[in-house]
Image: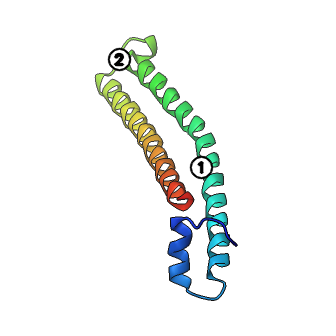
Amino acid sequence: MKKEVSNFVALVVALIQGDDAQVKAIKIQKKAKAALTSQIAVKEAHTLTLEDAVDAAEETMAKVRVNGGDAIISMDTYISRLLEANRFLSSQKESLTAHEEVIAFLKSELEIVKA
C-alpha cells in the first residue's frame, strides 16, 4: 500500500514491527475511527436528552422557589424543598457537563487517530 502513512499508523507500525504491520495498522486505524465516530454521534444525540433534563430541573426550581404559587405553611418544608430542587438541578447540570467532557475527549482522540 503506497498510501501516505499517518502519525497514528506510524505509531502502530512501530509497536507491531511485523511483516504486515502497516496493513494491521491501517485496519486498526479504520476501526478506531469508526468506533470513535459512531460513539460521538450516539453521545451527541443523547446530549439533547440531558439538556431537556436540565431545562426540566430549572423549571422545577422556579416552581419550588415560589412554592408552586401556594402560601408557605411550613418554612422548614419550603427550605427543604428548595434545597432538594437545587441539588437536583446541580446534579442534572453536572451530568450534562460530564457528558460534554466525554464528547470532547472522544473528539480529541478521533483527531489523533485521523492524524
Q: Which x, y percent locates residue 62?
A: 42, 19
For label 2, the crowd category at 10 Å Cα-Cα, with few meaning under 14, some 14 to 19 and many 20 or more, is few
Residue 36 figure quarter = bottom right
Q: Which mark is residue 107?
A: none
Report the front residue among 64 and 23. 23
Q: Is residue 27 above or below residue 80?
A: below
In this figure, which residue is indicated by the disc labeled 1? Answer: 40
Report the front residue among 36 and 42. 36
Q: Which x, y percent locates residue 59?
A: 48, 22
Q: Is residue 92 left or right of residue 30?
A: left
Q: Which x, y percent locates residue 1?
A: 70, 73
Q: Secondary structure at mark 1?
A: helix
Q: Is residue 2 above or below residue 106?
A: below
Disc 1 and disc 2: Cα gap in Å?
49 Å
Residue at the image position 33 percent from the left and 22 percent from the top: 74
Residue at the image position 41 percent from the left and 42 percent from the top: 94
In this figure, which residue is indicated by the disc labeled 2? Answer: 73
Q: Is residue 72 left or right of residue 6?
A: left
Q: Which x, y percent locates residue 110?
A: 54, 56
The kind of residue tagged 2 is: Ile
Cβ atoms under marks 1 and 2 closer than 8 Å? no
For label 1, the crowd category at 10 Å Cα-Cα, with few meaning under 14, some 14 to 19 and many 20 or more, is some
Between discs 1 and 2, the one toward the N terminus: 1
Q: Is residue 82 above or below residue 67?
A: below
Residue at the image position 37 percent from the left and 19 percent from the top: 65
Q: Secondary structure at mark 2?
A: loop
Residue at the image position 49 percent from the left and 46 percent from the top: 99
Give the number of the mark in front: 1 or 2.
1
Q: Is residue 58 above or below residue 49?
A: above
